[in-house]
Amino acid sequence: MMEESGLCHWSVIRSILAIVQWWGFNVAVIIMNKWIFQKLDFKFPLSVSCIHFICSAIGAYLVIKVLKLKPLIPVNPEDHWRRIFPMSFVFCINIVLGNVSLRYIPVSFMQTIKSFTPATTVFLQWLVWGKYFDSRIWASLIPIVGGILLTSITELSFNTFGFCAALFGCLATSTKTILAESLLHGYKFDSINTVYYMAPFATMILAVPALLLEGSGVIEWFHTCPSLFSSLIIIFGSGVLAFCLNFSIFYVIHSTTAVTFNVAGNLKVAVAVTCSWLIFRNPISYLNAIGCAITLVGCTFYGYVRHKLSQQSPGTPLSPRTPRGKMELIPLVNEKLDDKV
């Protein structure tokens, strides 16, 4: 009994530590990215994303090939271009849109819009793949949509371009999640192997647009930046932390239950919003804060409903085109990557 009690306590402590370090890396990456755009005046989201991809590719290589902390999941040579490359393209767009939105709108608003992802995932599966969902899933999306609408209407620092980038980022995240179910079928990638295979492709895809669209601006910034060395440390440090975030998501998934992961994920957004407000002091109205809270509660409720339904029905079909019957009870969900590479 004593041994079982000790194991139980250690399991709880391990889960708490996993969640705290996940929150820490997530908040640090978001705050550093916003700091880079706002305080360092490095207003080049494509270049920041490219640096993150390079750091993540190097980090994944070190973890898998050098330190051998994670086994490499082998991929058939023909699948590199047929499966991995299309996923990397959507993966790249997803990360870039997130950084573009962060360039133009406050962290609080960006994080709230990002919480719209469950709704876009369900909607795309219904619209494109013709899947049907239990009425409780649709009902659980109402507070998410309502909270997003209230937050958007009452946002004091609203920027149309940033808002659209964040919204299309949700669609890209949903598309990536849905495509992964078919394109990566047969490969059980964790977050580290995902970065190992996709980050090099994403770097290759983004390098030329970043050079053409932002190259001259980056060179000018180099010549005008008052504290170049410390600024470069922050910029490349954000790339290192972005990789650490993906390592931490692997740890937290394996240390917590699905319900804990869902609740912790939504509380993580609240922590990020609070920390960003304390640092940047962007104006937030009462109605805006209420809208954000409604959205997070809605996301938690959606996760709870999805978890309950998953316990009552068989697993998700092998392909989005493989129907389980008229009612497709369980929407797909992205639990492997925190989309902050």
Image (cartoon, rainbow, N blue to C red):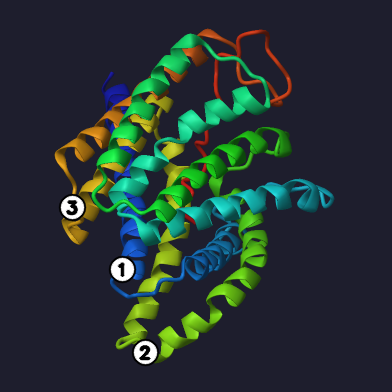
Location of mark 1 (residue): 38
In this rendering, the answer to whether 66 lies above or below 267 is below
**Closer to the camera, 27 or 254?**
27
Dot 3 corresponds to which residue? 283
Mark pair 3, 2: CA separation? 30 Å
Q: Percent from the top left, x then y, of residue 167?
A: 46, 44
**Badge 3: residue crowd in 10 Å (few <14, some 14–19, many ≥20):** few
Up-down relation of residue 266 to residue 168 (above or below)? above
- Look at discs 3 and 2 and give the one toward the viewer: 3
Disc 1 crowd rating (10 Å Cα; few below 14, some 14-19, many 20+) is some
Which residue appears at 46% of the width and 46% of the height? 338
* Residue 70 in sight here: no
**Residue 315 higher or lower than 297, as above or below:** above
The label number, if any, that marks residue 224 in the structure image: 2
Decide which of tag 3 and tag 2 comes sooner along the chain: 2
Give the residue type at disc 2.
Answer: Thr
Q: Earlier in the sequence, mark 1 or mark 3?
A: 1
Residue shown at the point (62%, 42%) measured from the top left = 189
